[in-house]
Image (cartoon, grey):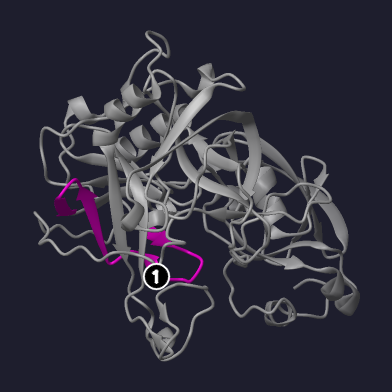
């Protein structure tokens, strides 16, 4: 027991939650810049509800419901997935760049299964499968995005949010189709990571054109880049836009997850997610993922501020997914927690911080001596008052690193040194 006169259900009620798992933040996508009212919006499927159904019969029929499929029998040749080259050589014209990369760009259509409780009423996502004329709700919401072929035998990289919906709670798509030229394929999900916002798909086809990847570390500010994608669905498929590298190493927070991204002014719109950002040598140096918006409601009306995941990061994540089924090195504490807000703090005369709801047996936190009821107030001396702040501090480190947690137990301030575990496919 602790000295405070409350229980976790009361904290959850005060927080507007009713769960003993870590509080899930609203999936609002914000760029955390001081005094800024701007917001971020992911750019897949704003075309959701503005899409073209595939009329062709898929060439193969493969389904996947798992985060990682261990039955792919991946050969040694596919362990290092991306076809990479040095970022040098002959500078290509815009026409030559498009001619080189276009055969490697695909359309992706994801069909989601709507939870039963949502089928008889509207959900909160504007444009997600609504027929506003007769107020009917589409029973299987469909979204579109873009992908890049990375091997000749059918492996494709795209954004995780193209195939996995966390905003509306639909989860992994129940069916995923890939459009390549005039052909349509059903895709298998090899693996995905929502924190890194990347996914690997597979179609049953050979002799495809794999994109060549360059090093994002070689990029220079002002360098010309080209984006290819499917804005607003497939009616405008394979749209080409041109711009420059506007910023490097931008620390951007999307869905409360910090990412290091390339900034570009090449036009990126809904449906471009998962498509390539290409350098002057015709090499993919980023996977387009998000853009600046003028509000928190998804209207991506601001132009010229888009973001892409750097190719060097993409390469590591893809290799990890293929080799291990998860992204290695991601740290884990092993706790469930809830924020002690200012209101709760005043109500129950307890310190603000992160209340430990539960500690996983044999986890890093358990080994360090943390217990249910502890209130974490700082990580390595940096104050934390929400689970998001705690996660952000944890994610500054890798698995195996040590961090110092400051916490309150029975009114007494204490510290503990925690050696972070590695999050993997079995415990994420």
Q: Nearer the viewer, residue 240 or 183?
A: 240
What residue range appears in magenta?
Answer: 163-185
Quadrant containing the N terminus in the rendered view: bottom right
Q: Nearer the viewer, residue 90 or 309?
A: 90
Residue at x 72% of width, y 76% of height: 15
| Residue 72 position (above or below residue 311) | below
| Residue 275 position (above or below residue 69) | above
Q: Position of residue 62 (x, y in %)?
A: 15, 57
Q: Identify the image quadrant of residue 92.
A: top left
Residue 283 placement, left or right of 194: left
Residue 305 placement, left or right of 73: right
Q: Identify the image quadrant of residue 282.
A: top left
Q: Position of residue 232 (x, y in %)?
A: 41, 58
Residue 346 showing in the rendered view: yes
Quadrant containing the C terminus in the rendered view: bottom left
Residue at x 67% of width, y 81% of height: 9
- Can you identify the residue that label 1 sits on? 49
Query: Mark 1: which secondary structure?
Result: loop
Residue 369 showing in the rendered view: no
Residue at x 63% of width, y 65% of height: 25
């Amino acid at each position: 027991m602790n000295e405070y006169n409350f229980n976790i259900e009361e904290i959850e009620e005060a927080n507007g939650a009713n769960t003993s798992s870590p509080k899930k933040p609203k999936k609002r996508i914000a760029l955390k810049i001081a005094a800024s009212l701007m917001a971020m919006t992911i750019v897949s499927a704003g075309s959701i509800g503005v899409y073209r159904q595939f009329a062709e019969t898929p060439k193969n029929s493969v389904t996947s419901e798992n985060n990682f499929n261990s039955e792919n029998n991946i050969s040694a040749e596919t362990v290092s997935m991306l076809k990479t080259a040095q970022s040098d050589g002959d500078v290509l014209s815009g026409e030559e760049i498009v001619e080189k990369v276009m055969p490697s760009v695909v359309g992706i259509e994801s069909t989601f299964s709507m939870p039963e409780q949502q089928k008889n009423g509207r959900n909160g996502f504007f444009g997600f499968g609504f027929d506003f004329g007769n107020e009917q709700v589409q029973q299987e919401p469909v979204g579109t995005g873009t992908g890049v072929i990375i091997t000749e035998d059918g492996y494709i990289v795209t954004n995780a949010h193209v195939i996995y919906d966390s905003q509306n709670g639909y989860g992994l798509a129940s069916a995923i189709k890939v459009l390549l030229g005039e052909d349509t394929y059903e895709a298998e999900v090899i693996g995905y990571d929502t924190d890194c916002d990347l996914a690997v798909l597979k179609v049953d086809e050979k002799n495809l054109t794999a994109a060549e990847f360059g090093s994002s570390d070689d990029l220079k500010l002002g360098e010309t880049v080209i984006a290819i994608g499917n804005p607003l669905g497939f009616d405008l498929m394979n749209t080409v836009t041109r711009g420059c590298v506007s910023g490097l190493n931008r620390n951007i927070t999307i869905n409360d997850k910090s990412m290091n991204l390339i900034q570009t002014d090449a036009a990126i719109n809904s449906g471009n997610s998962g498509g390539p950002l290409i350098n002057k040598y015709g090499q993919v140096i980023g996977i387009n993922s998000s853009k600046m918006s003028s509000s928190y409601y998804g209207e991506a009306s601001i132009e010229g501020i888009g973001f892409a995941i750097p190719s060097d990061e993409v390469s590591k994540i893809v290799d990890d997914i293929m080799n291990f089924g998860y992204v290695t090195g991601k740290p884990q504490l092993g706790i469930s927690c809830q924020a002690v807000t200012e209101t709760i703090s005043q109500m129950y005369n307890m310190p603000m911080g992160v209340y430990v709801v539960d500690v996983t047996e044999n986890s890093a936190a358990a080994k360090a001596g943390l217990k249910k009821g502890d209130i974490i107030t700082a990580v390595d001396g940096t104050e934390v008052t929400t689970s998001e702040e705690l996660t952000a501090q944890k994610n500054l480190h890798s698995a195996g690193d040590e961090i110092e947690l400051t916490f309150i137990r029975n009114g007494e301030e204490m510290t503990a040194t925690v050696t972070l575990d590695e999050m993997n496919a079995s415990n994420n």
